Amino acid sequence: MRSRAQEVVVETPGSQSSLHRANLERVVRAVRLAGSLTQAEIARTTGLSAATVSNIVRELKDGGTVEVTPTSAGGRRARSVSLSGDAGIVIGVDFGHTHLRVAIGNLAHQVLAEESEPMDVDSSAAQGFDRAEELVNRLITATGVDRSKIAGVGLGVPGPIDVESGSLGSTAILPGWTGTRPGEELRERLGVPVHVDNDANLGALGELVWGSGKGVRDLAYIKVASGVGAGLVINGKIYRGPGGTAGEIGHITLDESGPVCRCGNRGCLETFASARYVLPLLQPSHGNELTMEGVVRLARDGDPGCRRVIADVGRHIGSGVANLCNLLNPSRVVLGGDLAEAGELVLGPIRESVGRYAIPSAARQLSVLPGALGGRAEVLGALALALSEMGDSTLLDGTLHASAPAFT
Amino acid sequence: MRSRAQEVVVETPGSQSSLHRANLERVVRAVRLAGSLTQAEIARTTGLSAATVSNIVRELKDGGTVEVTPTSAGGRRARSVSLSGDAGIVIGVDFGHTHLRVAIGNLAHQVLAEESEPMDVDSSAAQGFDRAEELVNRLITATGVDRSKIAGVGLGVPGPIDVESGSLGSTAILPGWTGTRPGEELRERLGVPVHVDNDANLGALGELVWGSGKGVRDLAYIKVASGVGAGLVINGKIYRGPGGTAGEIGHITLDESGPVCRCGNRGCLETFASARYVLPLLQPSHGNELTMEGVVRLARDGDPGCRRVIADVGRHIGSGVANLCNLLNPSRVVLGGDLAEAGELVLGPIRESVGRYAIPSAARQLSVLPGALGGRAEVLGALALALSEMGDSTLLDGTLHASAPAFT
DNA sequence: CCGTCTATGTCCAACTAGTGAACTCTAAGC
DNA sequence: GCTTAGAGTTCACTAGTTGGACATAGACGG
């Protein structure tokens, strides 16, 4: 599952060439973070000497990674350096519970195109991958990007991925998909490296890079949909745990004698917060056509029953988040999924519950925010995953252009 | 709180000298992990060329960091390289609830001396630091190590440390110490850098490096004493969280209508598992002179009441650990504190509880073990902290000898 | 007991890559 | 128009790693 570049290029750590590689990355990172920089600025921010920067910029320019606009505005003779838009392309694919989403971005962290289409829950895995391939191809054509520039794909699936085999564990959302190896499937169809993770982790990454988590290093993303999951980012990286199943906040026990959960226990957070268990509560009064979205909408319109239900859900999520806080002490918790649309109606009770159940020193620095990306968090997270897995080096060591297959 | 070396030496990242520095560290680390290596072995494990290793070893030997024993056993002409015992000395100090412990170790991860003495809970902070200084000095004299070689001190305190100020938060164990800055205190007395952390984190680090956590990268250390705390090691490093209060497993809520906890909530794990709450249960039948140690001893001798109490404690701890597993999915949980002496009497119920309440995929790879170091875990963890905070670089950049003050 | 073999460690020349200094270039300011 | 100051480039120099040649010393076989 590691990048294949490492299989081909025998990297000698400790040699000058590795130092050079590191310096190339340093420059690219500096440019990307700033958008565009002059060489003198690069020298100052990276600490490298002007001469070195000059050489590196030339090398990057010749390699096509970077663009040098001959003269910038106003200055004396400063040539501004920026990542060339088509130096490398990353793709994010997200299989959601009802939608398939695809996004295309470049190495400058810009989203070039994004599209989603409804997907039938009952469609087979093969159909799903076909649709994904199709949509990816459509977007590639639409944006007119060069296929050979695709550096990697991030893929989000709504279920647990086995770290060893890359196969999808049992999921209630896509029942027919259990046991498939989504990464492998998509890799075969697209011919580029594919990095897979579950939707909660990608949501976390998405919000961290583009959404409510900007500027933070530790973040917990709580996604409430038909289940309840959490994605954890620790120190800027997705934390999956040794077994790859970290973040299963949905099945922490809140009440040992609570409702029976599908996992076999009783009183899991999920039995108090997920759509699967919450919607039936409203069935007598509101009918059985209700979705979580609908409940949120009604609640915002003032429906007292829905408001109450959402507040209760918030309180229970808050209990779970309090546990999370006591154990992990993240600096930010971001609420995603449909439920986030409820805004303060659900955040208020969450905060209240956290304040009550978490130890004060852990809760003090915590901010609980709604996701800023809505349903886009996962695709964008998939993009971010592709970017991070690629590392900055993939676009530097020349294998990018060589390794991408020739599409015809 | 950062190493002072960084203030003095202006490090130019990306220059060849930084590469050289990195290679020095690489070699030292390889030697330390293996105990002793020949140059050829160093070259193989580090990936450096034999020529480079030759140069580096000479440099390290001249600097006194490393010793080269002229000829090793059996081989052809392999000179074995090992860390010179007195290249650097680290000290671990642990303030426990009843004991003060001090250990002296060298950079080869060998413990040269270790001693503990009882400490009165009511003693003032000043008294405590006096005692610690005294004991440290005694051990230094006893082992005959060179004072100028002391690279750093790790200090364990039984309470939360504010990451910003380094001051000790309120602690029920050492009431008079609240607000003091233990690191600063000890640094002034000993004149060397002091790194502070709480006992649970240090216990985790100790067990990871020397005890039941060898070979694992992620570990949760649960310490049950008058309270319940957890130390988390993620990817080989102590995880403290942004606010520095991660691992507060003692105050996750198990039962919203349970006993009132000193933290103000009800049904915290602590109210079911810590000595403070458990011992009173046995008061009617066993009198009020009981300690946790005593209960464990009685349970091992067959006392049914004590057995039952310990099993109940185990079950509750198991519930907490199950939450921890679902959220963090560590590969190993190590039980420390007095309670660990109960062995299977407490581990069995913990495992059973974890098996019941954690999601199967998270619990499957988990091993729950008793601590291998007993009450020594914290001091040894303090040693490990000093070693890790020092980094390998401290002993390489020459500032070690210069920065250590002249003792008289 | 001696020659051969093999792996170790060292030395040297070659090469890679970063750096300071000198230099050129351009536009702004007077 | 002249000066000036910052930007980028060139060049000689230096630090540092590497491959290959070489010396060394034990093991092995005869």
Image: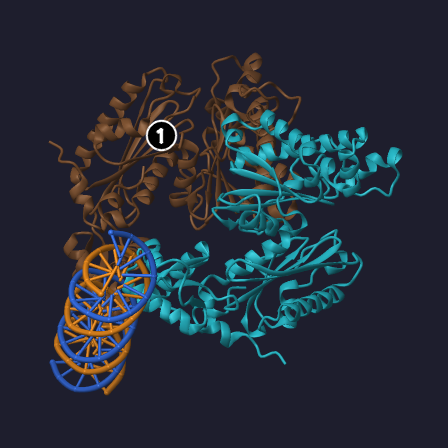
Chain colours: A cyan, B brown, C blue, D orange
| Front residue of this view, candidates A96 and C28 | C28
> To which residue does mark 1 refer?
B166
| Front residue of this view, candidates B124 and B19 | B19
Residue B248's place in the image compared with B50, above or below, is above
Residue A136's place in the image compared with B364, above or below, is below
Query: Which residue sits at x=56%, y=45%?
Result: A232
- Decide if residue A264 is in sight here: yes
Image position of A349 (left or right of A405): right
Where does the image place residue A286, in percent across and percent down from the top left? 87, 36
Specify the amino acid type for callout 1: Gly
Q: Specify the quadrant of the image occupied by residue B318.
A: top right
Image position of A332 (left or right of B89): right
Question: Which part of the image, by quadrant, shows the N terminus of chain A?
Answer: bottom right
| Secondary structure of residue under mark 1 | loop
- Decide if residue B72 is in sight here: no
Residue B125's place in the image compared with A154, above or below, is above
Task: Count every numbered label the image shows and give the total.
Answer: 1
Where does the image place residue A161, in percent across and percent down from the top left? 63, 56
Query: Which residue sits at x=27%, y=45%?
Result: B6
> Which chain does the residue under circle 1 lie in?
B
Q: Specify the quadrant of the image occupied by residue B252.
A: top right
Q: Specify the quadrant of the image occupied by residue A372.
A: top right
Where does the image place residue B209, in percent across and percent down from the top left? 38, 45
